[in-house]
Amino acid sequence: MTVLIMMFPFASRANNCTTSECHTEFKQLKKLHFPAEDNCLRCHEKVGKHKFKLVEQRELCFDCHDENRKRKYVHEALISLECSACHNSHGGNFKFYLKSERIDTMCFECHDKDSMTREFIHQPLADGDCTSCHDAHASDYPTLLSAGKETFCFECHEDKDYSKGNMKVHSILEEGCTGCHNPHSSGYRYMLSAAPGGICGDCHEDIGEKAKTAKYKHLPVEKDRKCLNCHEAHASPVESGLKKKQTELCVQCHNKWIKGTDGKQFNIYTMIRDNPVKHQPLEAGECHGCHDPHGSDFYKILNARFPSRFYSEFKVENYELCFQCHDSALAVSERARKDTDFRDGTRNLHYVHVNLKKGRTCRACHEPHATKNRKLIRETTPFGKWSLPVGFKKTPDGGSCSPGCHKPFTYNREIKTKPVNKKINQ
């Protein structure tokens, strides 16, 4: 009896298809599929002439593996019952009886390899492990992702999850990361779906067009990382995704002597630092109050028209930039009372300066960034290669100036029967 019990398993396996020397190739596999180990008839029919055709295919794999068919998104290979496209049905040398050790090798049988093997490849794909992101059989999420795209990437890229911080998050992240990044591979760094600058223009069309066509270009928009020179791509504590507050950001570049379009050297940072009286937009930290950081058709990337020369014939439309905030009435009338404090009695001295054939522009007397004097009055004014002194002094009801451009004058706002000063020579 004891001998029979010991021999029974041997006798049973002797009749197995893999041990009867008919299908010896399966014996070489590291791991046999469970049915192939002891019962081939789980999958094959036993009919005449030992053909062993498969049982009705729809029932075949799903008799045991039925857990994925009812999920929302099912892999096409599973829908078409082509499990053998990826798996060896009898066993294999790789996990899950896959036909290849690298999962991507099988995926590329159906999916375009060229689009996934460009210069910059997502690390899971470079490792050949598509199932790091995708479920091979079925999923509750589109493209068989193993989680929702809104949070999925953060499982690895935790440092890019700003949902819990006090940050202003780029709105496109609400739809996932693939609005900007190719999840498989790209010809651009950071796996961007297009070149920096160009990709931003897909959403920010008006800004992208302006950056391309503007007469006066802003250098950071043109060079290297383009938009990313000033903006954070994902989130920032500052409005508009800026890396820092506007003035802090701008003086990173404008903290050195720069040659302007007029050929003169200037350093905005030292001007702001050393002068207590600042132009209101600058005081508010809003350089974009006067300048367009993306480019402009106006001199010095200004937001609107302003004369580029020291002298200019006066027209309200030529000073569109200034009159966005300041009332044009301060310069258009020969006589004034409440429209301006720069008057001698009722004689409007703004009008006197600008309404000439060679009218003086605002910057002849005013510095647009910062000065030591009230009303942003300059200490010196640029004239060719010279710096002419303005020589302004405030008085209780007016002031005086002794500039390099005309003889000394005094003005007083008290009403007079005759003006104190004569017109400036034209």
Image: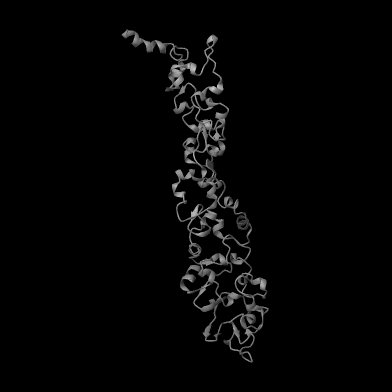
Task: State the residue in front, 33 or 202.
Answer: 33
Q: Is residue 220 visible?
A: yes
Where residue 177 appears, x then y in whole percent? 52, 46
**Residue 298 appears at what percent x and percent y?**
62, 65
Left or right of 26? Residue 314 is right
Residue for point 61% across, 65% down: 303
- The answer to which image quadrant residue 259 occupies is bottom right
User: Quick one: which residue is furthest to the front in this view?
Assistant: 70
- Residue, x 55% and y 59% (percent of image)? 219
Left or right: residue 16 versus residue 226 is left
Q: Give the image location of residue 196, x and y in percent.
A: 55, 51
Q: Residue furthest left?
A: 2
The correct choice, above or below, for 183 with respect to 7 in the image is below
Number of callouts in the render?
0
Quadrant containing the C terminus in the rendered view: bottom right
Judged from this view, the residue extending furthest toward the bottom is: 417
- Quarter of the image with the N terminus is top left
